[in-house]
Image: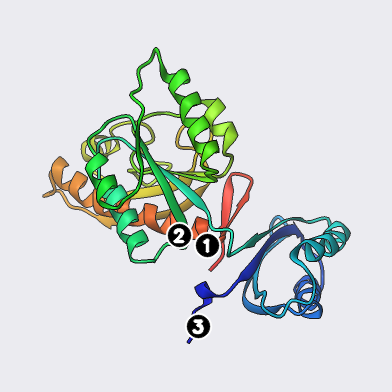
Amino acid sequence: MESKLEKNTATLILSCSDQKGLVARISQFIFQRGGNIVDLDEHVDPDEKMFFIRVEWDLSELNISSEQFEKEFHVLADEINAKWEIKYSYNKHRIAIFVSKYDHCLQEILWRYKNKELDAEIILIISNHTVLEDIANSYGIPFYYFPITKENKLEQELKEIELLEKNKIDTIVLARYMQILSPIFIEKYPNNIINIHHSFLPAFVGANPYKKAYERGVKLIGATSHYVTEELDEGPIIEQDVIRITHKDSLNDLIRKGKDLERLVLARAVNLHVSNRVLKHGKKTIIFQ
């Protein structure tokens, strides 16, 4: 039996003010052009009176080209004053992973990639240390070392951007990359840089969140994956999870338990992103199931 991932599909992600008949109009538009809808999820925000939808359809019987489809859909989108984009399954996301010395998040993503759980292409790994080069080599993924100091940070980032552009990277995953990216870097990849922060944001932003949580005596710790913006740890949240702790847990226990959360939360967030299930709306995200 052919799996959905083996089919060529298109995915529409759209938002606009709420109006009557939107689901019917969009579905009918796809049907009339030979598209067979295989997945649909929509949401209406009653407070903002906003409509959000993700529709995926099989392209095998489409009776017009994708270019013509988008041209004709543009007319409908203008009528309802919508923001929209269409992604195609054959244009897989091209990922670069940034790491420093911690390996747990990198290992989780590479393991899922090897087991074909991630419908994307991991093109390269970039690090400011050489510690994890052997892991990259074991998976046959090119590894690039860019040592960074306060003096050479901008110069090195420009070299990294040049490498990313040369390899047509569209998604960057910060798998515990212990560097703050410059505004110049972030501007190049808006809503396409995914970070993992080792706390349940907005609690304990910045450095040493486990130490802060331990000193505060919290009963839950968490991990948060979010898009990177110029405001540190303030980007739209994609995925979060928590685990319960007690007074018997040491700081090392918090770190150990937290690492399990970090790797799983980041992997889920990356999968949601490459599956085109995330719609950024202001400071928040709509996550389609």
Residue located 40% across and 54% down the image: 240
63, above or below 83, in the image: below
Q: Do labels 1 and 3 touch, CB within 8 Å?
A: no
Instruction: Tell me, for residue 24, which label it has, or none.
Output: none
122, above or below 197, in the image: below
Q: Amino acid at mark 1?
A: Ser
Mark 1 packing: few (<14 Cα in 10 Å), some, or many (20+)? some
Q: Is residue 77 left or right of residue 129?
A: right
Distance Cα–Cα, label 3 vs label 2: 21 Å
Tag 2 secondary structure = helix
Residue 220 position within the rendered picture, expressed as x and y whole percent measured from the top left: 28, 51
Pointer 1 residue: 275
Mark 3 packing: few (<14 Cα in 10 Å), some, or many (20+)? few
119, above or below 61, in the image: above
Q: Amino acid at mark 3?
A: Glu
In front here: 181 or 158? 158
Tag 1 secondary structure = loop
Distance Cα–Cα, label 1 vs label 3: 18 Å
Residue 278 position within the rendered picture, expressed as x and y whole percent measured from the top left: 56, 57
Residue located 67% across and 78% down the image: 60
Pointer 2 residue: 271
